[in-house]
Image (cartoon, helix red, strand yellow):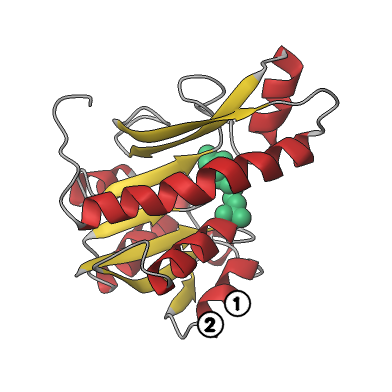
């Protein structure tokens, strides 16, 4: 059984996609042992509670320094003793120590086709605004392992999504979630849980 901790910041639709995929058997041999949010008001916390999944908020607002927050976040993750940490819309920079402690055991969902529209400051709606501004005809989502950089780790799955004329950033975000994120994130977890993924170098 792969024990996963899911880190969230907002609505938690990706968390919901994982919960649903475990319930309907699309993700096998996997248990969500905990949910961590940096935001006390995240609806994702409600989604966890409904399913009786232990859920905690660890907010930077409750700590005097970033280092103290990082320590608490790391301790919070260790407490659940997960095999895999899933960043599902977790809009916080992961402390380097967490990347070291969970080497090759952290994955992230990003709402673009990396290496487009990624890196520092590119998260949430901004990614889709940038894609619309550039006028791309195709965008998508990427699930990847997390390394020391921002959105630089080995790519696991990507899925393309059409940009339609007149799309708003919100409309594009919704289509990317429905057609790509909610598909490839559960697929990646299932593949890892069932030994289908191996990391070699940057692949
Ligand atoms: C998702 O679109 C996810 O790809 C994005 O935040 C959203 C969270 O939605 N993550 C990033 O931008 C990370 N760089 P959700 O809370 O409904 O899952």
* Above or below, comparing residue 145 to residue 67 in the picture: above
Where residue 140 sits in the image (x, y, percent)? Answer: 56, 31
Q: Which quadrant of the figure contains the C terminus?
A: top left
Residue at horizontal 21%, vertical 61%?
A: 83
Q: Is residue 165 visible?
A: yes
Extreme residue toward the right, this view: 166
Quick one: label 2, few (<14), some, or many (20+) residues within 10 Å?
A: few
Disc 2: which residue = 49
Where residue 21 sits in the image (x, y, percent)? Answer: 43, 64
Residue at horizontal 47%, vertical 75%?
A: 56
The quarter of the picture where residue 33 lies is bottom left
* Above or below, comparing residue 4 to residue 188 in the picture: below
Disc 1: which residue = 46
Q: Are marks 2 and 1 in contact (CB under 8 Å)?
A: yes
Label 2 element class: helix
Q: Is residue 91 visible?
A: no
Residue closer to the observer: 137 or 62:
137
Residue at horizontal 28%, vertical 72%?
A: 80
């Amino acid at each position: 059984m792969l024990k996963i901790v899911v880190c969230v910041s907002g609505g938690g639709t990706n968390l919901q996609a994982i919960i649903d995929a475990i319930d309907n058997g699309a993700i096998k041999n996997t248990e969500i042992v905990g949910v961590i949010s940096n935001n006390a008001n995240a609806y994702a916390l409600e989604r966890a509670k409904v399913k009786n999944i232990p859920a905690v908020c660890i907010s930077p607002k409750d700590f005097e320094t970033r280092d103290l927050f990082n320590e608490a976040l790391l301790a919070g993750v260790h407490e659940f003793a997960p095999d895999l940490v899933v960043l599902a819309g977790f809009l916080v920079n992961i402390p380097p120590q967490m990347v070291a402690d969970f080497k090759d055991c952290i994955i992230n969902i990003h709402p673009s086709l990396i290496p487009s529209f990624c890196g520092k400051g590119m998260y949430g709606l901004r990614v889709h605004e940038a894609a619309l501004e550039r006028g791309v005809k195709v965008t998508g989502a990427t699930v990847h392992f997390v390394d020391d950089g921002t959105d630089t780790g080995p790519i696991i799955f990507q899925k393309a999504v059409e940009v339609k004329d007149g799309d708003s950033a919100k409309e594009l975000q919704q289509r990317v979630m429905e057609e790509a994120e909610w598909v490839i994130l559960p697929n990646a977890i299932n593949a890892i849980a069932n030994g289908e993924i191996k990391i070699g170098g940057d692949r």
